[in-house]
Amino acid sequence: MVNNPLILNDVFSALADPTRRGILGMLHDGERIVSEVAQAFKISGPAISKHLRVLERANLLRREKRGREHYLTIEAAPLAEATGWLEQYRAFWDNNLDALDSFLQESSNTNHQTNQDHDDDSKPAEA
Amino acid sequence: MVNNPLILNDVFSALADPTRRGILGMLHDGERIVSEVAQAFKISGPAISKHLRVLERANLLRREKRGREHYLTIEAAPLAEATGWLEQYRAFWDNNLDALDSFLQESSNTNHQTNQDHDDDSKPAEA
DNA sequence: CGGATTATTAACCATTGGGTTAAGTGTTTA
DNA sequence: TAAACACTTAACCCAATGGTTAATAATCCG
């Protein structure tokens, strides 16, 4: 698996924003129009518009205009690209040689997981 | 798998830069000191220093000072977090229901992969 | 037609990001 | 002790991000 850095730049930086991950989360369940997405977040319409453009640049979003509404769906391929890159490092946390070494070092500082009881991604809050 | 958005923000934005992915790539084979890493890229020392700090903030990097040298190793846990988030979307490109729908739409525009023969990540170039 | 709806573009602002050079801190060694 | 080495911090530049409000474009509908 040879990764294209240009794609990875766009995909990872697209995923770096919680609003954008939230948008993809909404689209997980099926297509949505822009106003539905916008309504789910507390930011302005233009701000949403910009986020959508970023997702489109990363080819993570497909837009289909029907009348005055824009129907949005996920485009999965770039996520596969990102996953492919990360796959290179699976050995580092999976159960094998490197994990042993990793474990030995991690056993010093307990509770290193920084898991502050915080929950899921930027899901819109109760409409 | 409940993802922590704070972690994901840091991890994905850390991975969004090709130099930082290149650094992790070097560390894939074992520990390196800062000057070794720096030598591999065409940017200044302080620039490398900043990249290292970003990787540390994302907890992707562990630093151990021995004398005047800083030994760097990968910290894998946050990569697992990122992979976990992406795993949510595996259904979209794997062989199943959604893939069918995806395929039907994608079959229109051929060669949508944007795979411009470009190779791997920001690997240092020939020392 | 005219108004409401959907969404984008334009212009602006503050913050962050990636880079630089110069200076500073700590460690090794001749 | 003084110089060389490893690395970071400080100060600065410029471009990109993420947000805003106001204006524009296109479509639907009474």
Image (tube, coloured by chain):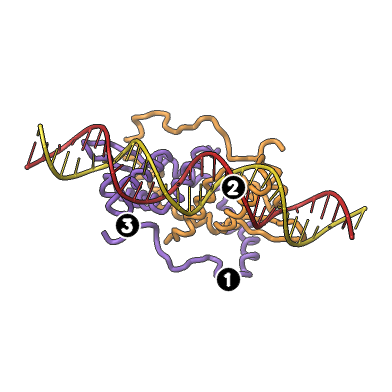
Chain colours: A orange, B purple, C red, D yellow
Residue pictured at 55% horizontal, 70% vertical: B111
| Label 3 residue SS | loop
Q: Are marks 1 and 2 on the same chain?
A: no
- Residue at numbered disc 2: A20
Residue B31 appearing in the image: no
Identify the amino acid type marked 1: Thr
Please tell me in which quadrant of the rendered image residue C28 appears. Answer: top left
- Residue at numbered disc 1: B110
Residue A80 is left or right of residue B52, and the answer is right
Q: Which is closer to the viewer, label 1 or label 3?
A: 3
Whole-Å distance between the Cαs marked 2 and 3? 31 Å
Task: Read off the chain for label 1.
Answer: B
Instruction: Tell which circle, 1 or 3, labels the residue nearer the N-terminal end.
Output: 1
Residue B62 is marked as none
- Residue at numbered disc 3: B124
Q: Camera-side residue: B38 or C10?
A: C10
Identify the amino acid type marked 2: Arg
